[in-house]
Amino acid sequence: MTAENKKTERAQAHERRPPTRFGAKSLIFKALVRFLPLALAAALLLMLLTWHFTRRDLLADIDTEVGIFATATCRVLDGLLWNFHTEEMVSALGAISSHTAILGAEVYDENGKLFLAYGITPEDRVGGLLTVWRDIYRRQPDGSRTDMGKLAIHYTYTFAEERLKLALLRDMALVTLIIVLTFSGAAYAFNRAVNRPLKALRKAIRTTTETGRRTEAEWRSDDEIGEVVQAHNDMLERLADRNAAVIKSEKVYRQLFENAQVGIYVTNSNGVILGANKTLAAILGYESIDELPEIDVSSHYVDPDDRVRLWTRLGETGEISRFRLRLRRVDGGLIWAEMSGRMNPDGTFNGILQDITDRVEAERAMEERDELYRAFFEENKAAMILHDPLNLSIQFANPAACRFYGYSNAEMTSMTMREVDCMTDAQVYQELKEATEERRNYFKHVHTLKDGTRRHVEVFTGPVSLGRRQLHYSIVHDVTDKRRLEARLQRMATRDQLTGSYNRHAFFQRAKNELARARRFSHPLSVLMCDLDFFKEINDTYGHAVGDEVLRAFALRCRADFRQNDIFARLGGEEFAALLVETDAGQAMTVAERIRATAEAMVIPTDAGDLTVTVSIGVAALRASDSVNDLLKRADDALYEAKKSGRNAVAGR
């Protein structure tokens, strides 16, 4: 050990040595050095100021007392001097000995000559001697004044100042003693209240520093020092907890490093591995991480240009992210890898390597599948649309859809499904309801083309995921011709081909529904049975073609007179029936009479000329136990009565 090291160690040991209680470095000593002289100086200054003002007042009091004494003595001496009582005058002057400041007195006659002297006079040449003069006179009975001489009183401040100085010295000694005792008590109290806990705190800090173990200061109090010590102990506890957390975190990060499913490594600027985890060894085909140090990573590059591109990018940005390259394992196998990392200030490189061979193969398979789906979507002859279910915006449309609707792809993808669907919200809701009830996997809509043409379509819709987006795909089939054929078949199944009225089957089907509804809601319901009078003669005379013209004209007129909710049907031949909803017997009779009068007044143009025809009508109102057949039977009976009464009449049952 060199002399310089020894000197440094001695200095450090001296610094570590705890200060004595009242050493030069102790707080008590520093406090005494700083505050005791100031306190003494302040006390001395205060006492000097007090002494000065006290002396001034004392001297003024002496002057006043001497003046009063001189005046009082003159009142005594005037009579004695008038009668020349010298002995009594001496006795009177002897009273000055009662005042410590008065040293002597002199009496002068009216001519200014010394008449009598007592005590110390100016001739004695005493220092600091002061004199007070008073006139001696006698007041005559007539009020006049007779001057008899003067009185001189000689006094001094010396004795009073001496006593004042002694008192000052005594007070200064007392105050000094009080200050010393006060500071001694304060030092003792400071030592008990501050120095001892600070000593315990220093000891705890020193022990913690030297041993590295958490050592709390053994001191408890409810004052500020106690709070400081407690704060130190709490801080040690928090530091210990934080240290434990750091150790735990380091352990966790070490476990993460060792158990990470990606390769983590550090290389120098030449590509030599300085450290790595076991996952990197497994990726490159090494049996353990002990084989990795001093391995040159560049030996694993399949394409040397990848390394050049990697370090070029690192030189430009200092970091890389998801750099894809091919590597060769130790066993010669080829893998796809993805590398990310960052350069360190010392030129080393922290990197993460991940084997993405399976992902690359999956991506290629997905690309092939996407290409297949794209070809299926683009080349399909059916109109196909992808739209957002939230706002119905069209996201994609295949060429077949563009050709069907007459829009370009850009126009289609700027529109919404509501723009091509001409159905109202209520109609769309009703269609959704019917499709659910019928368990159909398609929806019936009416779409509008660019040229304004409306086409009936069947839309097959289902959900599809596109990344994180949920879309609906729709395959649109044009079924306009199909709908027209269905409508024609439906009309043929429910309508009379000659008159366009409902046929017998449709009438009975709808009549049953209306009958059930009337019973459920207790509503009235009536039926009219109509039969053209002498219709057989028209057929026989003019032929069946004219008869058909008459039937069509009569049916058309009746359909125009009946309400939309009423059911008018041709039951056969020249026989018609009408079911009137919400109509009682009286109202039905009124309607029947109107139909009869209309038929009678109607002129029917035919190939054989204008013809007229009359009609007989039977009316029946719904009863509680009626069926459709019962109701028609009673209406038919009423019709028979109308014909029996001469035709062109109305009868009711």
Image: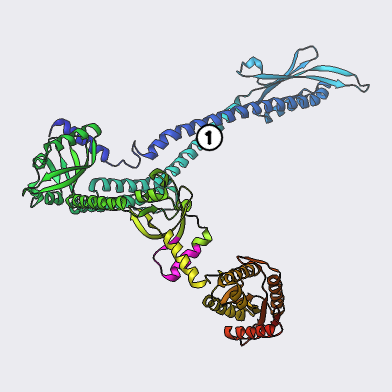
Task: Between residue 626 and residue 201, name the one nearer to us.
Answer: 626
| Residue 176 percent coordinates (x, y) | 49, 36
Q: Is residue 259 above or below residue 575?
A: above
Residue at image position (43%, 59%) is 480
Residue at image position (63%, 84%) is 636
Task: Between residue 69 and residue 384, name the one nearer to us.
Answer: 384
How many numbered marks does the figure carry? Answer: 1
- Range of magenta residues: 429-444
Which residue in the rendered view is the most extreme toward the front?
541
Q: Is residue 623 above or below residue 597?
A: below
Q: Decide if residue 653 is in sight here.
A: no
In the rendered image, which quarter contains the C terminus?
bottom right
Residue at image position (49%, 30%) is 41
- Mark 1 crowdedness (10 Å alpha carbons): few <14, some 14-19, many ≥20: few
- As for residue 15 lying within the magenta part, the answer is no
Residue at image position (64%, 75%) is 580
Q: Is residue 562 above or below residue 584?
A: above
Q: Main secondary structure of the magenta part?
A: helix
Residue 117 relative to residue 478: left or right: right
Q: At label 1, which amino acid type do we have? A: Arg
| Residue 73 percent coordinates (x, y) | 77, 26
| Residue 460 percent coordinates (x, y) | 38, 60
Which residue in the rendered view is the most extreme toward the left?
331
Residue 290 relative to residue 592: left or right: left
- As for residue 434 lying within the magenta part, the answer is yes
| Residue to which mark 1 is pinned | 170
Which residue in the rendered view is the most extreme toward the bottom?
625
| Residue 122 percent coordinates (x, y) | 65, 16
Task: Between residue 212 and residue 597, name the one nearer to us.
Answer: 597
Task: Between residue 205 and residue 149, name the one nearer to us.
Answer: 205
Q: Decide if residue 546 is in sight here.
A: yes
